Structure formats: C-alpha cells, structure tokens
Amino acid sequence: MTKCLYIETVGCQMNLLDSELVVASLRHRGYKLVDRAIKADVILFNTCSVREHAEEKIYSALGRLKYIKRQNPQKIIGVLGCMAQNHQNNVFQRAPYVDLVVGPGQLHQIPDLLDEVSKGPPQRLEVSLDRKGFAKTEIEQSFETYDPLRTPEMRSSPHQAFVRIQIGCDKFCTYCIVPKVRGPEQCRSPQAILAEARQLASEGCREITLLGQTVNSYRYQRGATTTRLSDLLLHLSDIDGIERLKFVTSHPCDMTDDLLQVVGSLRKCSHYLHIPAQSGSNDILKRMKRGYTVEQYREMLSRIRQYIPDATITSDFIVGYSGETEADFVLTKELVEECRFKNSFIFKYSERPGTKGALHHVDDVSEPVKKQRNNELLDIQNTISYEDNQLRIGRQYEVLVEGPSKNADKHNLPGSLVQLTGRTMWDHIVVFEGDRRLIGQILPVTIYEANAFTLFGEVKTEHVGPEVYQLSS
Ligand code: SAH
Ligand code: SF4
Ligand code: F3S
C-alpha cells in the first residue's frame, strides 16, 4: 500500500535542498507527498537551530501531534536536520512520541530508518560526531554530504535547482550554531558538481544556484590543481542549457578579485551577491569574530562596484548582540544607509547554547530594545528598497518565469492567463500576467509599478512581422 508523507521545512536553502532530496528518495520507495500532517503515515520536520524561535516552533508543532500519535501509534514522526544534530536525545525527552531523530549528515539513511521504526520500537537517533573530542577526519566523515542524483519530476521546479558545492563552516562566528550542527567545511569535487549540473541541464534546468555557508571560500585541491569558485563558474557557464548561475551565501573575507572578475564578465552569472555585514560597528564585529572591519567591508563593496558596476547586494544584520550600545547601533544604521542594499534580512540576537557567544558574552540587550532596533533598521532598509525599485519603473528586464505568483488564486484571469512570478538577473522579484506555458522561459518584462519588495510588469509580446510569417509558412 502507498504510504503518505508529510514534510515541513524551516531554515535556509540548505534545508530546502535537503528536504527536496529526502522527498525524492522516499518517492522512489513509493511514498506519496500529502499537504497535511493529519493525512500522513510519516510526518517529518526538517529543522533549523539558528535562532531559538525556529526551534520552539518545531517543538510547538510536535506538541500538536501528541494527541494524533496517541490515537494513531502507527504514524511515524521524525525530526531531521540542524535541531536533530543540536538537541539529539533531548528531542525524545521533550517529545517522547518522536520515532526518529536524524542529523543533516545522515539523511541518506532515512528510507531504511523509516522501514526499521515502522516495525516498532526502539526509537532511532542518527547524528554526526561532536566537533570536539574526535580526530578531524573522523568528524568530517560523520558529516556526509547528501547529494544523490535527482529526477526532474522530483524537483520543486524543473527549470531551477540548488546545487550544493560545500557543506559545513569553519568560521565560528561567536553567535552562530551552524559550525556545530553542520560540521566542518568540506567542498564537493568539481567533477561531482559538474556532473550534477550537466544532468540538470539535460533535464531542462536553466538556472543553478550554488549553495554553501561561505560559498565563496569554495576551494578543492587535488594534487597540484586547485579549483576555486571562479573556476567552477567558468566551467558551469560552458554547459549548454544553463542560462543563469547564482551562488549564496558569500562571506566578506572571501570576496576575491578573481571571483568578482568572473562574475562581472560571464554572461550567465547573475549580478547579485548576498554578503552579510552583520553589524556596522567594529567593536561588535570583533566580538562576533567576523574577521573584518567596517572599513574592509566598504573596501570590498567598492571593489565589487569596480568589477560589477550594476551589482545588487543584499545583507544580513543581527541587532542587539551582546554589548551593542546605542552608538554601535547608530553605526549599523549608517552602514545600511550608505550601502543601499537591495534588501537586508534583519534578526534579533538569539543566544545559542554551545556557541562562544553564549559562553563568553552576556545577552545583555533587552528584548524591547532588540525589537526597537530591528524595526528601525527594517524601516531604513524598506525605504531604500522602495526608492531603488521606483527607479526601475519603465525599464525592461529579462525575467526567468518561475511559476504562478503567491496570489495567483486571488486573481481571476480569463482563459489560461495567470499571475506569474519570476526573477531578473539582479534577483528582483517580478510579478506579471501571462500564460502558464511561459513558466521556465526567459522573457522581456517591462516594469510599470513597484513596491519595496516586488516589481510589477508586463510581458513584452514579440511582434511577428510578415517576413517571419513568410519564413515559417
Ligand atoms: N553562512 C551565512 C549565514 C548563516 S545563518 C553567513 O555567514 O552569513 C543566516 C543568518 O542568520 C546570519 O547571517 C545571521 O545574520 C543570522 N544569525 C545567525 N545566528 C544568529 C543568532 N544566534 N541570532 C540571530 N541571528 C543569527
Ligand atoms: Fe555562521 Fe559565521 Fe559560518 Fe556564517 S560564517 S555559517 S554566520 S559561523
Ligand atoms: Fe538553520 Fe541549519 Fe540553515 S541552523 S540556517 S537550517 S544550516
């Protein structure tokens, strides 16, 4: 009998990719994806530990399943990903009816683990080694990259795909849990990445987004040959069918000239860079152990402008980190005003047990102050995003059509017309009306309206002149 699978995913693109791959592997085993936990035989949560709130949301969702599990003990509940690695057995303590806890390094085992737990207890815990107390290679091996080849119908979009080029992180910013839960930085071989990209292209994929926590530090050494991200982009851009290349997330310290030169010169490279600054205060950056000063960040931005004059840049900021004074926050506001990011993701500092920050830096900025700073910075950023987007009105962009927009159902359009969404080469979201069959195409769209987050446009329909008509008749 077909088993039904429900999966809920929180966190970053790494998690979205992991979930996609887990779902694909389970579909191969005959599982069918359903849209509600109540209908499912197997309920999975792919979790994030980056802020406390992300973890609490999962425990609340698990809490809501307690009664369902009591009524239907044969249902299987699994907690996967970063929180599984972070909390390990504690997940069972807080939610004893969970059957399976699987870290990001053990996702390949999920189909077999589900078969095992479906036969009854015991519960199963599969996680990687802690980063302390074991040999480096042992730790690395315990965080296995999970990148099975996918089939097109199992991807969330046939025209776009994430491709992992690096796992883990070795930067150890003091606030961050990622190095603990995702393990040491390890890069996939260029051969494996290119094989995956070629396969994706042959299946009709047009856009590839390379993923890594500090993706621009990608480096793969074999013998005398070192492959950097710039080399990888050059190879990837030779693949027929692939039209767009992006990569996230970049670290300011690894934004080297060779990379900027390649991004600026390759037709297929998106001129969009996500390079979190985190703070505009040198004192705070130092406490965060980010490894750069505000002056160095600015210098990096000016190098980007030199190589890629039209680049759009986005950033992340943490407000209310331990010791952040009003004066520090003013410096952050000034940086945001000066850099005119396309947009910024702004987070209130959330202390993460197990990080250097939790050990050495008191979480001393009150919640109301964090909230206030968050709102203030968001207002500044939103004004900039709005102003920037206004300047785009009247311009025409090549848009890769991604699919129906979030509000497509609310717009009752005639025939096969639907409200569509897509992105420009600079990563602007564009909404416009068009035929469903346009999904996956790259089209010229003229912008007529804009808010801080979205550009609204019209597809420029090709004029079919008589000579074209004669040619085809
Ligand atoms: N690898 C990326 C980011 C990973 S986490 C990088 O180096 O930039 C995504 C974002 O979450 C971070 O950029 C940071 O802004 C935020 N973040 C990480 N830990 C946090 C914490 N403890 N509290 C609040 N925000 C946090
Ligand atoms: Fe976290 Fe810093 Fe690594 Fe980014 S670079 S994942 S913020 S430790
Ligand atoms: Fe969260 Fe893990 Fe990504 S902690 S941000 S899902 S790497």
Image (cartoon, rainbow, N blue to C red):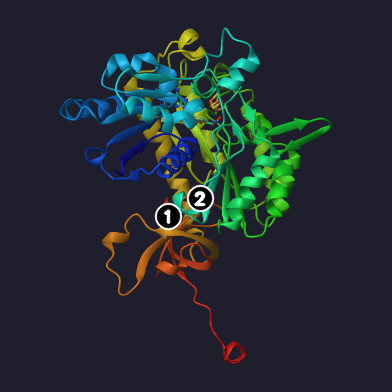
Q: Which of 201 and 382 is in front in this view?
A: 201
Task: Give the vertical position of 315 relative to 125 (above or below).
Answer: below
Q: Position of residue 38 (x, y in %)?
A: 22, 38
Count of labels in the image: 2
Amino acid at circle 2: Thr
- Of helix, strand and loop, which one carries label 2? loop
Which residue occupies 58% across, 49% down?
A: 208
Q: Mark 1 points at which residue?
A: 454
Q: Mark 2 points at which residue?
A: 151
The residue carrying mark 2 has its beta carbon less than 8 Å from ligand 3? no
Q: Where is residue 47 in the image (x, y as percent from the top left)?
A: 39, 29
Amino acid at circle 1: Thr
Task: Give the vertical position of 426 relative to 314 (above or below).
Answer: below
Quarter of the rendering containing residue 44: top left
Q: Position of residue 450 (x, y in %)?
A: 42, 58
Q: Which dot marks residue 385?
A: none
Which residue occupies 67% across, 59% down?
A: 240
Question: Does residue 54 appear in the picture of this structure?
Answer: no
Q: Which of 107 and 300 is in front in this view?
A: 107
Q: Which of 119 and 163 is in front in this view?
A: 119
- Report how far apart the C-alphas of labels 2 and 1 lie in the structure: 32 Å
Task: Give the vertical position of 417 relative to 79 (above or below).
Answer: below
Q: Which of 129 and 413 is in front in this view?
A: 129
